[in-house]
Amino acid sequence: MKVPLLDLKPQYQSIKNEIMLSLDEVITSQSFILGPNVEKLELEIASYCGAEYAVGVNSGSDALLLSMMALNIKSGDKIITTPYTFFATVGSICRLNAEPLFADIDPVTYNIDPVKLESLIDSLSKQEKTKLKAIIPVHLYGQCADMEPILEIAKRYNIAVIEDAAQALGASCSIKNEEKKSCAMGDFGCLSFFPSKNLGCFGDGGMIVVKNEETATKLKSLRMHGMGETYFHQYVGMNGRLDALQAVVLLIKLPYLDSWAEKRTENAGLYKKLFKEQGLLEYLSPPQTGEGFKHVFNQFVIRTKDRDKLKEHLIRKEIGCAIYYPLSLHLQECFKFLGYKEGDFPESEKASNETLALPVFPELEKAQIEYVAEQIGIFYGR
Ligand SMILES: *Cc1c(COP(=O)(O)O)cnc(C)c1O
């Protein structure tokens, strides 16, 4: 049996007619740049997250970059984030010549550890603290970072919080006993609509969710070369708009998002049940959802010391699986200039050697999940 890591075709088939009709309307109108569909999507995403404003941009990476541009992040500023994330989180910091500082992850959630975050800030000199401008917590794999202490620390030091929610639209966690969706907690919530995310478009797309009109207006200017009145430029911005064609696809998909996340959660639950039945829980450390957290399983990630051999075995059995991410960012060649070495962030390094993502997309058949679990069982001699 073949089990792909991700197959987007069945989802498309289920909504093909709706999408074709809407795409045809936009194409017939020949209005491709911004316009009513982008505005409608901005309102719907903001409201879905429980926030006031959202600004459509052309990718999750640019959502991060534009958020930092809106904060006037410049050369010499410092921004704290996790070393265990997709490249864009840190790449966008460096593109503004700001300096990324890393706090290691919690080995259970793979998200930034608030205790390490706090001790990192404590270790900075007074001079360095004045350069510290923001924290970027990443909601990795679809589970929110531990936001309550992170928000408290950010408030205490008067620094901005930019949520990297690229993998976590629809995830939530509880803040002071109140359920809060991702993107509605920090000053900026960055989303990606890359096809493999839980809400994916037909190419690249992204959005920034914000709390006040002033920031939304600045972001809207920044995504249009910093323009206010046509051809009069207030800032040096960039071309960072979301396409109307992508907005139309996303408007059709958004109403299905929660039911797709439920299927992902069911699939994750079935894996865990099957692992347990085979006595494999301690070998595989499947994801744990913290109390008060809602996980949306953009990825279902297990961890094992036998990762590379297990991966080979699964690929031989035609089961798709992948490593997110094989090299901690502080050890990447392009970040050598930051001066980090192996051992600096041990939990992140360990995770990069042990984690493996299994197929979890909503349209998976039960038999396919059973086959994956069975093959893992065979690998462990069950
Ligand atoms: C996908 C992703 C991004 C970047 O999004 P793009 O739309 O691909 O630019 C940023 N951060 C994380 C954690 C991601 O998973």
Image (spheres, rainbow, N blue to C red):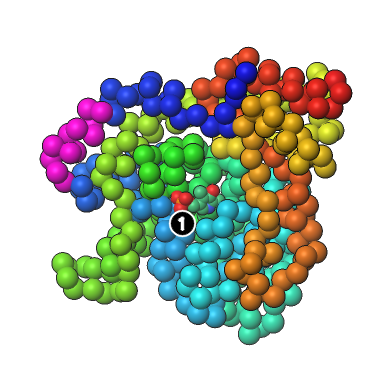
| Residue lying at 76% horizontally and 41% vertically, measured from the top left | 308
Is residue 165 part of the magenta span, yes or no? Answer: no
Position in image of residue 58 (x %, y %): 36, 53
Using the image, determine if residue 27 lies above or below residue 370.
below
Q: Which residue is mark 1?
A: 61
Position in image of residue 178 (x %, y %): 57, 42
Quarter of the image with the C terminus is top right
Q: Nearer the viewer, residue 279 or 230?
A: 279
Q: For residue 349, which quarter of the picture? A: bottom right
Is residue 21 part of the magenta span, yes or no? Answer: yes
Q: Nearer the viewer, residue 122 or 307?
A: 307
Position in image of residue 123 (x %, y %): 74, 75
- Number of numbered discs: 1
Residue at disc 1, secondary structure: helix
Q: Nearer the viewer, residue 58 or 116?
A: 58
First to last magenta residue range: 20-31
Q: Main secondary structure of the magenta part?
A: helix
